[in-house]
Image (cartoon, grey):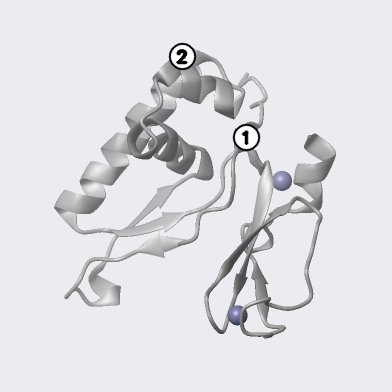
Amino acid sequence: MARPKTHRLIHTPPLYKGFKPIGVMGRDLVTLEMSLDEYEAIRLADYEGLSQEEAAVEMEISRSTFARLIESARRKSSQFLIQGKRLVIGGGPVHFRENLLQCHDCHRIFPLSMGETINSCSSCGSTNLIDLAGGYGHGRCCQEKS
Ligand SMILES: [Zn+2]
Ligand SMILES: [Zn+2]
């Protein structure tokens, strides 16, 4: 029987839900799914340059779990680059520590505590704000978790 998965903590929601290669028709593309915990592993280890030990602490998981996660995330990244797949980011046993709201009109990003909200963009005044954690199906669950 599989052990229940513990939740991994992701700092903030990714800004992009996916990527696709230039010059390939959508219908010819094979989709590669990268979970939010794999995305966070790449961000912490490769983008921020943390050691695996430090990154595991950030995500509140064991070092061996982190090692498996980063290995799988790197394999997927290389397949995406070399084989030209559509990359879709989402899912996984995760919660976010903090949220981001993005202005739909001027694209400015507003970092907020989970559960906190604003009504309009302080740059352009637009009320068309996108809840990025909400877009990944998160929000209240992350607050209850932390
Ligand atoms: Zn704006
Ligand atoms: Zn959540």
Q: In which quarter of the image is residue 116?
A: bottom right
Please tell me which residue lies in front, 142 or 97.
97
Cβ–Cβ below 8 Å for labels 2 and 1?
Answer: no
Distance CA(mark 2)–CA(mark 1): 16 Å
Q: Name the residue under label 1.
A: 9
Using residue 39 as the reference point, say whether residue 13 is left or right of it: right
Residue 78 to residue 24: above or below? above
Q: Which residue is drawn at 16% across and 75% down?
A: 23
Residue 17 at what x, y percent from top left?
47, 61
Q: Of the residues shown, which amino acid type is indicated by label 1?
A: Leu
Q: Which residue is drawn at 67% across and 82% down?
A: 128
Please tell me which residue lies in front, 116 or 30.
116
Please tell me which residue lies in front, 116 or 133.
116
Q: Name the residue under label 2.
A: 64
Quarter of the C terminus within the rendering: top right
Residue 116 to residue 40: above or below? below
Q: Please, what secondary structure does the residue beneath circle 1 have?
A: strand
Using residue 117 as the reference point, say whether residue 2 is left or right of it: left
Q: Please, what secondary structure does the residue beneath circle 2 have?
A: helix
Earlier along the polypeptide chain: callout 2 or callout 1?
1
For disc 2, the neighbor class at 10 Å (few under 14, some 14 to 19, many from 20) is few
Residue 122 at what x, y percent from top left?
68, 76
Residue 83 at what x, y percent from top left?
17, 53
